Image: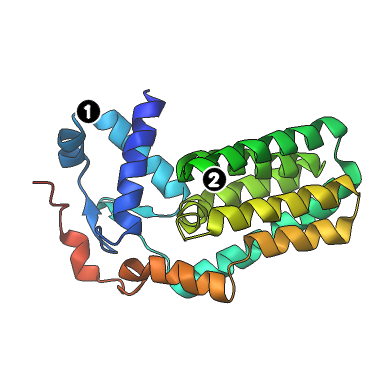
Amino acid sequence: MDIRRAEIIARELEQFILTGEYADGLRLDEVKLAEQFGVSRTPVREAFQMLTVSGLVEQLPRRGIFVRQPGPVELLEMFEYMAEIEAVCGRLAAKRISEAALDLLRKANAKCQDAVEKDDVDEYYRKNEQFHHLIYKQSGNGFLEQEALRVHRRLKPFRRIQLHLRGRMKQSLAEHRAIVQALNDSKPDQAAAALRDHVAVQGEKFHHLMINLKPRTDKSPNTGSRQRVLPLS
């Protein structure tokens, strides 16, 4: 299994979905996609599995794979839940985090700073992901860590697309520093609040996210569209 190739295909399809180029309910044809990407059907199937985890596609028995785009209410609810999970992780980590983990968080932030200076959104997201995963781990609660990872995977495309908003990377980095400070000072309530505010997308941040996703979320599900085959020519 070529994971790297599947990841590249998944990223390409993700972009088509997030920009609205692939409408809600569109059927994805793995044979034509394999031809388009010049690969066998195996990495395309693996890419479908990755997109299923993030909820951007769904498999309907005996019908195939279809684009599934969450509406604004569902998206807001998911981010609200994610914010509370991360707040709990931060609260526990403030009591349990090791000096070694704090050092790793600072190093991840340094790499985030480099990405900001280079205006490299993809690199920033990779280091941002490491940052958050470290905090999940340092909560010291294995069940909570796995749940945080699960929801993080579900929201990954939307967390990443936020970083394309002007000034968001710099703002995110500043929020990271406040989180590290609260963890370093062993202040559970402050760490929880900092993480909750960092992840939540209510208010202006949610408004800007929805503008970015407007071509997608303005489309309502169309059952008739489920019979269409993805045009690849």
- Residue 156 in sight here: yes
Please tell me the numbered disc located at residue 51: none
Give the residue pinned by disc 2.
116
Percent from the top left, x then y, of residue 100? 82, 30
Q: Residues within 10 Å of mark 2 (few under 14, many from 20)?
A: some
Task: Please state if 217 lies on the left or on the right of 176 as rendered.
Answer: left
Observer-side mark, 2 or 1, equals 2
Question: Is residue 227 shown above or below 93?
Answer: below
Outermost top residue: 1
The one nearer the camera, 128 or 173, is 173
User: What residue type is disc 2 on?
Assistant: Val
Q: Residue at x 18, y 29 (%)?
A: 38
Residue 67 visible in the snapshot: no
* Residue of label 1: 39
Disc 2 secondary structure class: helix
Instruction: Look at 47% across and 60% down and name the residue there.
Output: 166
Inspect the image, locate mark 1, and give the three-letter code of the amino acid beneath it: Val
Measured from the top left, where is residue 7 in percent x and y? 39, 35
Instruction: Count neighbours of disc 1 (C-alpha within 10 A) and say few if under 14, some if 14 to 19, many if 20 or more.
Output: some
